[in-house]
Image (spheres, rainbow, N blue to C red):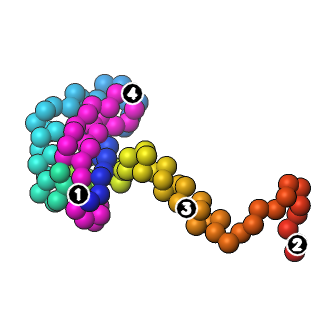
Amino acid sequence: MVQFVTLVQIRPGQAGEIGSHLTPHAAQWQHLKHQIQLVGGRVNQIWNVLGNDYDLLFMGEADDPKTLHRIDAVCKSNGYMAKTHPAIEAEEYARLVEDTANVLGYGRQRRPGGVEREA
């Protein structure tokens, strides 16, 4: 299972254009949520995102990583700028970083400080 976050801009115009922003309506949120579900995503939470280029943040999960691409395609086919990212819990990420460091350091010995590698 893949966790995801999708950021969506549902207002017309470019960020920063005065008077071009419309308030996101609940019908738009529900429509996008339904379409995300049709392509295999399960939306757990919807948040309004204030103070940046995006209006909505969808948090959810999918069984297939390809669903993340489908979610972006659904949003864009409706005329909304969107970015979907895989997401993992912070503790799991910390374990991945540690595991990666262990793999990359496997079989290597630390050199004493100030000792340069031979060419």
Question: What separation in Å lies between label 3 and label 4 (alpha carbons)?
Answer: 35 Å
Q: Residue at x 29, y 39 (%)?
A: 57
Looking at the rendering, in which quadrant would you find the C terminus?
bottom right
Mark toward the start of the polypeptide (3 vs 2) = 3
The magenta span reads: 43-70
In the image, 41 versus 102, the foreground residue is: 102
Q: Is residue 26 left or right of residue 22?
A: left
Quickly name the residue at label 3.
Answer: 100
Question: What separation in Å lies between label 2 and label 4 (alpha carbons)?
Answer: 52 Å
Q: Label 2 near label 3: C-beta < 8 Å?
A: no
Question: What separation in Å lies between label 3 and label 2 (alpha carbons)?
Answer: 26 Å
Q: Residue at x 88, y 72 (%)?
A: 118
- Closest to the camera, between mark 3 and mark 1, is 3
Quickly name the residue at label 2.
Answer: 118
x, y (%) of residue 106? 64, 69
The furthest residue to the bottom: 119
